[in-house]
Image (cartoon, helix red, strand yellow):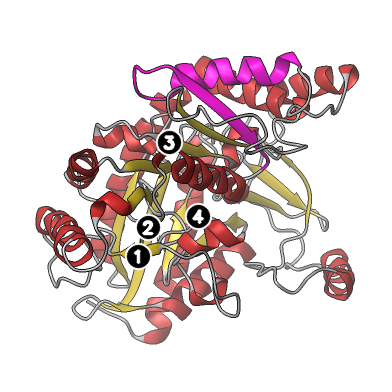
């Protein structure tokens, strides 16, 4: 029997939530930007319960972390077994089986035939930092090319690549030198004035050749392209199918590495283990985190044995590859395999895309719907012709949905992100999208937005 979800028993934030919010503001860094005052008490599967007893459907998976849902029994059992053995012993100085077993599994599920090796850290930004250092060390080249709208983390190296929101960079310069930003092939919003995906793809590639390589930086001094195969914080932007094959060809011509940042899009989120697999190319380095740890801190940088041949002491982390995190990760991968969650993400995502496209036909506030698997973006605009971002309206939809029991969040300037656990019950999923549509309808009526 499916429990009644969502279920709001006290208007959020309730009294217990408000009490903790006050305590939080007194001691927690103000650099955190919370989407709304949701105070979590416990969670299970696709359901979050706040401290006042309200039940929410989790449409963001704890920021794309809980791909197999909250507290999956198999993951929890693996964690408990490891906790009973030992919690920590530095993997960079000694040995244990959990990190070896996880690395063995990861090299099996990443694309490419070459022999691979794995470096473990604790987070997405660490995985990206390790990727940058590895690319610099291997190529002996100083320049890195990243893409406008990308998010790669907030530590200095990865922040130097990040360009999704100005506030993330403001006040922290100078950042890492030698980073160049170029347009990402966004078919809906791009500086080239076209919505034709193939033309957008070709113009972005031509920009790199014509404006960067021919006028600014010689390609033989560029060590790597760093990209998200589907941009996350930038708005869940899906590039045209031809772009990454074209980038792979360009990189190969000049001996440049491709680094695929799969921190948000990887681990089955898009219906494949890695989002880059949708585009038929093999990157040289993959950075993974978020869902990789099944809710525990874990990051991984995966590359070929040839590239990852750096010497002992060149990079390490005391907590990287923590045995409890590795146990959770192995169990998470097993759940994805045993429950057929790659196939389910693809199937459910395709059905969701159809329903959302039908929704877009009815609602002028929706300018674009895009995605792969269960990584779907709904971009809201005030005017479809001008594509003026509906930033306030997107936030209003988010807040109203949360108050009705749907934990959805925004991305980019005015997009809603749909990223539930891959095993979310269909009843919860469709009801959640109905609630989101109800809020869109409310705002359209209030603001007089019509077709």
Q: Was residue 102 drawn as part of the magenta stretch in this picture?
A: yes
Magenta segment, which residues? 96-122
* Image position of 138 with respect to 158: above or below: above
At a point 71% along the width and 35% down the height, the residue shown is 320
Q: Which residue is mark 1?
A: 181
Quadrant of the image containing the C terminus: bottom left
Mark 4 or mark 2, which is nearer the start of the sequence? 2
Name the spot of residue 196 as percent of width and height, x first. Answer: 11, 59
Q: Is residue 61 visible?
A: no
Indicate which label's residue lies in the foreground, 4 or 1. 1
Q: What residue would you read off at disc 3? A: 285
Crowd around label 3: few <14 · some 14–19 · many ≥20 (10 Å)? many
Which secondary structure lies at badge 1? strand
Sequence-earlier tag: 2 or 1: 2
For marks 4 and 1 on the same chain, the one whose residue lies earlier in the sequence: 4
Residues tagged 2 and 1 counted as in contact (Cβ below 8 A): yes
Other residues around mark 1 within 10 Å, as few (<14) / some (14–19) / many (≥20) = many
Nearer to the camera, 434 or 22: 22
Q: Residue furthest bottom?
A: 447
Q: CA distance from mark 3 to mark 2?
A: 14 Å
**N-terminal of the two: label 3 or label 2?**
2
Cα–Cα span, label 3 and label 4: 14 Å
Tag 4 and tag 1, C-beta contact below 8 Å = no
- SS assignment at label 2: strand
Q: For mark 2, what is the residue? A: 146
Residue drawn at (64%, 39%) of the image: 315
Q: Are marks 1 and 3 in contact (CB under 8 Å)?
A: no
Q: Is residue 334 left or right of residue 388?
A: right
Q: Is residue 261 above or below residue 408?
A: above
């Amino acid at each position: 029997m499916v429990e009644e979800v969502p279920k709001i028993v006290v208007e959020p934030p309730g009294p217990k939530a408000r009490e903790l919010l006050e305590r939080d503001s007194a001691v927690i860094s103000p650099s955190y930007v919370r989407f709304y005052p949701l105070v979590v008490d416990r969670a299970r599967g696709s359901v979050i319960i706040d401290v006042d007893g309200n039940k929410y459907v989790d449409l963001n998976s704890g920021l794309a972390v809980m791909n197999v849902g909250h507290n999956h029994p198999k993951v929890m059992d693996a964690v408990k077994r490891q906790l009973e053995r030992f919690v920590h012993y530095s993997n960079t100085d000694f040995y244990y089986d959990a990190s070896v077993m996880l690395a063995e599994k990861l090299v099996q599920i990443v694309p490419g035939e070459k022999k691979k090796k794995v470096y473990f850290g604790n987070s997405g930004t660490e995985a990206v930092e390790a990727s940058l250092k590895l690319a610099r060390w291997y190529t002996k080249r100083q320049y890195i090319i990243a893409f406008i709208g990308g998010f790669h983390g907030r530590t200095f190296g990865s922040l130097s690549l990040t360009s999704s929101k100005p506030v993330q960079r403001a006040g922290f310069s100078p950042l890492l030198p030698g980073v160049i930003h170029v347009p990402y092939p966004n078919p809906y919003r791009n500086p080239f004035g076209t919505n034709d995906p193939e033309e957008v793809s070709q113009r972005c590639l031509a920009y790199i050749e014509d404006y960067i390589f021919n006028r600014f930086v010689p390609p033989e001094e560029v060590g790597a392209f760093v990209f998200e195969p589907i941009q996350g914080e930038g708005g869940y932007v899906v590039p045209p199918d031809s772009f990454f094959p074209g980038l792979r060809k360009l990189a190969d011509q000049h001996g440049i590495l491709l680094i695929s940042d799969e921190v948000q899009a990887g681990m089955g989120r898009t219906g494949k283990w890695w989002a880059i697999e949708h585009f038929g190319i093999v990157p040289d380095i993959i950075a993974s985190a978020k869902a990789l740890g099944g809710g525990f801190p874990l990051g991984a940088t995966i590359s070929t044995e040839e590239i990852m041949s750096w010497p002992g002491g060149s990079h390490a982390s005391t907590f990287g590859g923590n045995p409890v995190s590795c146990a959770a990760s192995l169990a998470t991968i097993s759940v994805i395999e045993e429950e057929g969650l790659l196939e389910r993400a693809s199937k459910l995502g395709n059905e969701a895309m159809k329903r959302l496209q039908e929704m877009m036909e009815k609602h002028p506030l929706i300018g674009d719907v895009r995605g792969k698997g269960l990584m779907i973006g709904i971009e809201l605009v005030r005017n479809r012709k001008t594509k003026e971002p509906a930033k306030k309206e997107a936030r209003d939809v988010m807040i109203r949905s949360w108050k009705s029991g749907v934990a959805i969040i925004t991305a980019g300037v005015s997009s809603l992100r749909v990223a539930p656990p891959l095993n979310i019950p269909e009843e919860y999923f469709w009801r959640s999208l109905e609630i989101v549509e109800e809020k869109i309808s409310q705002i359209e009526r209030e603001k007089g937005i019509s077709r």
